[in-house]
Amino acid sequence: MDIQLSGVTVDFASHGLRVLDDIDLSIGDGEQVALLGPSGAGKSTLLRVILGAVRPVAGQMRVGGRDPFGRPADVTAIRRATGIVRQRDDLVRGLSARTNILIGQTHQWRPLDWLTVLRGRVPHRYTERLAALAKRHGVDEFLGTRIEHLSGGQRQRTALVRALLPAPRMLLADEATSGLDPTRATEALAHLRDAGGATLVVTTHDLPVARQFPRIVALRDGHVVFDGADLTEQAVQDIYGSRDLAEVGS
Amino acid sequence: MSTTTTPRIPTQRGPAPAPPPPRREPNPLLRWLLFGVGAAVVWSLINTDVGVRSLIQGRDGAARLLEGLFPPDLDGTLLSRVGTAIIETLQISIAALVLGAVIGLPLAALMAGNVQAPGWLSGGARAIATTLRGVPELLWALLFVATVGLGPAAGVYAITLHAAGLIAKLCSEQLEAVDSAPVEAMRLTGASRTATALLAIFPQARANIASQLLYQWECNIRSSVIIGFVGAGGIGQALGISMNLFRYQEMATLLIAVLILVIGVDRISRAFRAHLGAASHNPTPTLTTRFRQLLTRRKS
């Protein structure tokens, strides 16, 4: 699923802020990209634009050949083909990890699946894939536990399995490894990168994470300041300014 | 070349005396408003005969009533009738709660802004809920007694309609108060509005909605006592009959039974709400809570 953005500009009028300014970006089908930048650079907003959740004031967008702000059918098609993992706690309290994973694809459910999921069970056609993913990410130990009783890392892994379960054509991960310990973070990143040829966009403020990707797009104050493979020291200075580079893991 | 400007030196000796603070002119609108409120209070008190004089005039009647209440009638036949009336009151309150929830919860879902129901549907639900709760239970009871006749059925219908309106309003607020992040995340997966409501909004609000329903049960008990006076069944109907026939000792027994019932239901409801972990969200303190708070304040 390719992503084409041209002249995309986003203003948060209520705060008088220009979050993204004239962004031109082209990501090919199956490409893996790290969106690097400090907090407030506009990385998360860019992901929300791709999913049609934040409307730009200017620019043109195409995601998989569809307009994310076009007909409702186009918007739904883009979203259903996408897996998302966000830094924010997106899981539903009061439901188990298992149910939280399954509710990522209600559009595929048959009437009886509703009863199966609400009874805390897994519809037959998901059983095998869910078991494999849960084991791979160490989620199998707490599938039946309610989300509010899980640690931050366990929740992050649950969100990761939720995003991966439908075998999406595009994966958007917003600081998805930030809540994990280094070993789990490396594993999660490897699993994301190994997600069956899906287009992958990972936002991060962490240089070592970004360096694992074949392409890095760096944002600063809503502008693209770097787009390439080899991040030079000068480029890092451009992205982070005079901040202590140890802070960003250089 | 640089130019310098000479600062202007004040010609007065010493600092100038601070001007007196401007006298605030009272807002004439506020003055008229206060006058209007005062006049309305005096007018209301005079025309409703409220005052010490009316209380003194009624002292003989009050004494007769209080004297008549003691000792409460503990006759076996009466106690059995009181027991039946209590059970009927409980049945009215529970039936009205279930039916009220069946009507009120779908209305709440349609009214909640984050469910994003179509405008005509949410507007319609809002209008229905406002109408249902806008008419007091007593008026609904009079209407149903006139249509379905005396008895508990009229009470159930009356309380159901009012409770449905209240449940719709209070539960829609609980639905709107849930964390928006999981709701947005669910929407971003391409889930439908119904799926988002059922799986991302309702589970988060479940405990608070259950707490709200339990509180509504307490309200239903109190309402069923009141509407019983117009013949809508339950212990209220028995109380009305005793009062009309001047059987004060019987009335005393019934009043004690009402108190026990209300306090008992309050305790049960509180225990359940504490178990749900949502007791702190109780929007309105119950009568016993208010009484307890009053006692605590007096002691301190």
Image (tube, coloured by chain):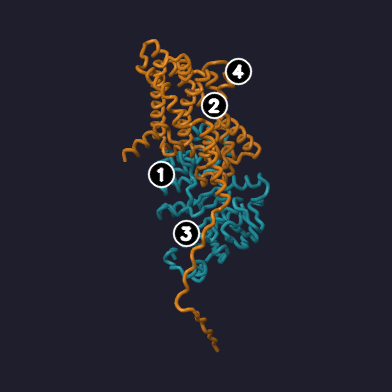
In three-dimensional space, the C-alpha distance between marks 1 and 3, rounded to whole angstroms, equals 25 Å
Determine the chain carrying the residue at label 1.
A
Q: Secondary structure at mark 1?
A: loop
Judge whether B162 appears above or below B75 on screen. below
In three-dimensional space, the C-alpha distance between marks 4 and 2, rounded to whole angstroms, equals 15 Å
Residue A194 is situated, as x and y percent measured from the top left of the image, at 51, 51
Q: Residue at x 48, y 39 (%)?
A: B204
Q: Are marks 1 and 4 on the same chain?
A: no
Rendering quarter of residue A56: bottom right
Q: Residue at x 59, y 40 (%)?
A: B193
Q: Which residue is mark 2?
A: B137
> Which chain shows up in cyan?
A
User: For the residue carrying disc 2, how many other residues have a C-alpha within 10 Å: few (<14), some (14-19), or many (20+)?
Assistant: many
Of tags 1 and 3, which is closer to the observer? Answer: 1
Image colour assigned to chain B:
orange
In three-dimensional space, the C-alpha distance between marks 2 and 1, rounded to whole angstroms, equals 46 Å
User: For the residue carrying disc 4, how many other residues have a C-alpha within 10 Å: few (<14), some (14-19), or many (20+)?
Assistant: few
Q: Is residue B22 visible?
A: yes
Q: Are marks 3 and 2 on the same chain?
A: no
Q: Which residue is mark 4?
A: B147
Q: Which residue is mark 1?
A: A150
Of tags 3 and 2, which is closer to the observer? Answer: 2
Q: Looking at the image, which is closer to me, A164 or B22?
A: B22
Q: Which residue is mark 3?
A: A209
In three-dimensional space, the C-alpha distance between marks 1 and 4, rounded to whole angstroms, equals 56 Å
Left or right position of A76 against A247:
right
The residue type indicated by label 2 comes to Glu
User: For the residue carrying disc 3, how many other residues have a C-alpha within 10 Å: few (<14), some (14-19), or many (20+)?
Assistant: some
In three-dimensional space, the C-alpha distance between marks 4 and 3, rounded to whole angstroms, equals 74 Å
Determine the chain carrying the residue at label 4.
B
